[in-house]
Image (tube, helix red, strand yellow):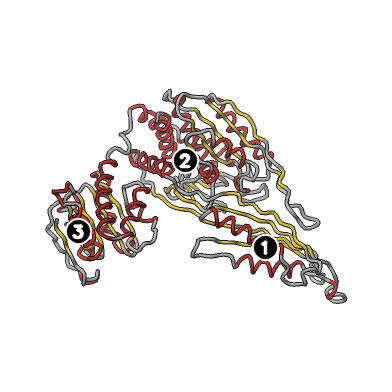
Amino acid sequence: MHVVFRESHGLEETETPTDLGQSPADLVVLSFSDSDLGAFAAGWHRGGGPEGRMPTLRLANLTALKHPLSVDTYVEQTLEGAKGILIRLLGGVPYWSYGLQQVLALAQTKGIALAVLPADGREDTRLDDYSTLPVSTLRRLAHLCDTGGEVAAQAALAQTAQAQTAQAQVEPAISAEERAMVEWLGEREDDMLALLERVTNINSGSLNRAGLEAVAAVFDEELRELGFTTSRLPGELIEMPSCPGSDYSIDLSDHLLARRPGDGKRLLLMGHIDTVFPPESPFQTFHREGDTIRGPGVADMKGGIVVMLYALKALQAAGALDAAAFTVLLNSDEEMGSLSSRKHLEEEALGHDWGLVFESSGNDTMTRRRKGLGQARLVIHGRAAHSGGAHEEGLSAIKELAYKIVEIESMTDYETGLTVNVGVINGGEARNTISPCAEALIDLRYPQPEQGIAAAARWEEIFGQVYSYPVDGGITSESYVNLHRPPKIPTAESDYLLEKAIAIGRLLGQDIGITDSGGGTDGSLTQAVGLPTIDSLGIAGSGAHSNREQARASSLVERAALSAVLMHRLARQ
């Protein structure tokens, strides 16, 4: 074992290239802290060193690797011969960005197990993009490293060594049958774009029943041509409390369900046909400029449904569609919180082995963890009166709502990740009239299920309390509260699915990262009832919910190829 210690040197003191002159080893550990490296040395000795069948080990302090030439020398002389590399990083990617890029390129080329972990005890998912190991393995290694001590260090070294062996077997090379599917898709980009343009130009805002049915009919026909039997699941009228003269009840459209029997695993494929753009929105049409396409729903998520359909078409072209039992559920109310389709999604989840959601893959990333979502509609009833001649006789609903908003907004806690937003308010009749009614629409995001339950209970307390008048003075309230999406909390099975998709992507030349999100998808619902679910399989895009929505046209074929290979392999497991 060779150790390079630089305890007293900062990065600014190592501008001159340094040849560390180390020979290769099975494992290499890099850290900014000599005490950190000392723990790994102790753990290695505790395991008996080479006599105890521990892998050969090299340790080096990253302060000796500031200069790019120092990095290049170390990569060439030491890291190229490694089987596993573990890096403990302070300060995130910017503190060693060149080194991370070079080491990741080497690891991907040589098949080296690479784990880049934060050294400050915090989870930094950006570092996952510079690692080659599964996210679940990275989290286990991070926990061991944060625990500290020679016992945990020994276990971390052993797991890194084991990960290299496992990594070599993560995904076999693309087979001839799979290559044929990929090539078939490569010739279908124009067809995919034509279908996406057709459905994008049909307005399917969440409350536009005619438009939603028109889009559903297009996808219904496509699925029936693939041998699916199709049906509709009923929507629902969701009644909401409202001030007199307004009606915020939601009349939700039917949902498209399609089934195709098969011999292997049962796959549930999910997408939504609704968008946030109503018929009167000025953002209505599909437009292409080079590799960029724009339009309502191109990313969120009509583009994803086109990816799904063509992945199925590729399987059919290869004669592989019978290898799995497929169910497709395209709902019409996802942008409203899946308020009527939730029960259908959860019911279908219980009868399947894997769940795949074709939401956008953003900037070539897949989402691992999502916050839970809640919503509330609050209506305050007061008493109208002339603001000049009978002010004392009035009870201002706006005034009471203002007090309640302060209480509601104070629930936000950035430390725990819980956020609350009063996003829409309305009330009053005239400048010179005490407001008889006021209403608000409220959003909630929460990382853990118990936080959502506690927040909903706190909402009910606030809604039921009167802050600006005597309790029995006549102010009343009505509310609708719904924790409509649970958090998507990773499991070993969902991490396996995510890591499998990313590994297949690498085989296809697609560099896909991992991220977490405060936004929800229907995959949160299916995973919460036990179905391992991956989302973000759709087109790469950005600007959702705005007139800046766009997507990368070439990613249609890329994601369809990845999805086809993924489904092909899941069917046989």
Vertical placement of 374 versus 503: above or below? below
Q: Which residue is mark 1?
A: 461
Tell me how far mark 2 sits from mark 1, CA to CA. Answer: 36 Å
Describe residue 22's horizontal placement relative to residue 306 as left or right: left
Q: Secondary structure at mark 1?
A: helix
Outermost residue to the right: 389
> Where does residue 533 sit, x and y in percent of width and height?
48, 41
Observer-side mark, 3 or 2, equals 3
The foreground one among 402 and 98 is 402
Q: Which residue is mark 2?
A: 532
Q: Residues within 10 Å of mark 2 (few under 14, many from 20)?
A: many
The foreground one among 280 and 236 is 236
Whether residue 390 is visible, yes or no, is yes
Q: Which quadrant would the N terminus be assigned to in this image?
A: bottom left
Q: Which residue is mark 3?
A: 41
Residue type at mark 1: give it: Glu
Vertical placement of 96 versus 239: above or below? below
> Where does residue 400 sit, x and y in percent of width and height?
73, 68
> Where does residue 330 sit, x and y in percent of width and height?
58, 37
Q: Tell me which residue sits at (40%, 40%) in the image.
A: 501
